Image (spheres, rainbow, N blue to C red):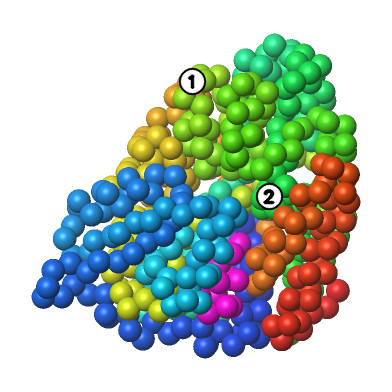
Amino acid sequence: MTSSATARRVRSTALIAVTALSLTALAACGSGEDADAGAAGKNGPVTITFWGWAKGTKDVVDAFNAAQKDVKVQFQEIPSGNAGGYAKISNAVKAGNAPDVFNVEYPQLPDFVSQGAVKDISKLVPAGLKAKYLPQAVQLTTLGGSTWALPLDAAPQTFYYRKDVFAKAHITTPPKTWDEFRADAEKIKKADPKARIATFFPDDPSTFEAMAWQAGAQWFKTEGDAWKVNFTDPATQRTAGYWQKMIDDDLIDVAPSFSQQWTAALQKGQTVGYLGASWGAGVLGGTLPDQTGKWAAAPIPTADGNPASGMLGGSTFAVSKDSKKAEAAVKFAEWATTTEAGIKARIASGTSSAYPAAPALVPVAKASFKGALFQGQDVYTLFQDAAKSIRPDWAWGPAMGVTNNSLKDSFAGIQGGKGSILDSVKGAQSATTKELGNRGIKVTG
């Protein structure tokens, strides 16, 4: 993820975020003025509350609590963001009882910042700490010239597949192009009418957004003091058309992400591939302990076979706006993201394959990852190569909650023939444009 192209993408992202957030009175979103309240006092360690859902998080908290005495973390596991976690956090912020620190993914961070839900932690993040992270990750957490979170991981796209099932269908190598992916899907279905090569997740728009990103789409740009919003550019239309036809021709399954339905299909060998990201290796390993050695990871297919990736997720640690213990919260987040002990605890749990945002810790993650499902495959080298191919120029908008909710609501009817993916995307553009207008943000396009 260190290519100049990726750096250009991040600079573009930062510029857009700065422009949007300045239009929404960014300076009023939090100041970090009470950060020193987190220091350990005479009465013992400072106790902070933390909400998150990333795999291996409890192990990280346990290791942190055992490693030092000044700060203690009380951890509450909540549903993933798209499964209700973000709504829970937002409601807690509004009610004034939010945790001190919580996980938020890169796409949603500008939304949380623009709504004043997180604290500016610039004073607690010196240059030396920033230097430990990928510059790209730092810029994705730097909005309006201020630091709003510490990055945990990056998340290049990855395709996971059942080697044994592919072999039985006479598929000798994973697909390099989307045309080959469709051809392989037909072979899989022909070999076993109940099997499907992958799943379309109607409840998780970020998967489709990553596909559009990979295809070269640019949903958000800036023009002067305004946003240009365009979800129906040629790249998005091609992406929507491809996946619509895959659904219409019954070549992929349609099921909620990480649901019992999806899990059962994987366990029964009815779903034999997963279009995910670097963190997906850990998800599959924890889900399919009885399929050791049967899976492999491969680069995500592309239109022309040349490497290209979007980014699917990627998480940060943000401090809630009303926390009186920001210093302690940042101390925990720093430990979790920049120390060997923190990364080892997460990866050695056996459920996480997070690709660290701190480059020096990638070898630590690689050495700690058990990966029995992949029979010793060097997945971290694959992730490194994929990260270098992330396309430049994609940027997240400041109202992704509205964007994603619109897509999620509309995607729910696709399998039943109610609308289409492209109709859903058009509806999301309309809803997003309206929301930006309601926030006083000028929009063109």
Residue drawn at point x = 26 percent, y = 48 percent: 63
On the image, the x and y values in percent for residue 441 come to: 72, 83
Res. 367 image quadrant: top left
Q: Can residue 334 be found in the magenta stretch?
A: no
- Circles 2 and 1: CB atoms closer than 8 Å: no
- Asked if 180 appears above or below 308 in the picture, the reply is above
- Asked if 228 appears above or below 247 in the picture, the reply is below
On the image, the x and y values in percent for residue 413 come to: 81, 49
Magenta part of the protein: which range?
A: 107-119
On the image, the x and y values in percent for residue 66 come to: 20, 51
Packing grade of label 1 (10 A; few <14, some 14-19, many >=20) is few
- Asked if 216 appears above or below 86 in the picture, the reply is above
Residue drawn at point x = 38 percent, y = 56 percent: 76
**Whether residue 94 is visible:** yes
Q: Nearer the viewer, residue 221 or 405?
A: 405
Left or right: where does residue 20 sit relative to residue 428? Answer: left
Query: Where residue 203 is drawn, which disc sits there?
Result: 2
Q: Can residue 117 be found in the magenta stretch?
A: yes
Task: Indicate the quadrant containing the C terminus: top left, top right, bottom left or bottom right.
Answer: bottom right
Q: Main secondary structure of the magenta part?
A: helix
Residue where numbered disc 1 is placed: 290
Left or right: where does residue 270 sit relative to residue 44? Answer: right
Label count reads 2
Q: Earlier in the sequence, mark 2 or mark 1?
A: 2
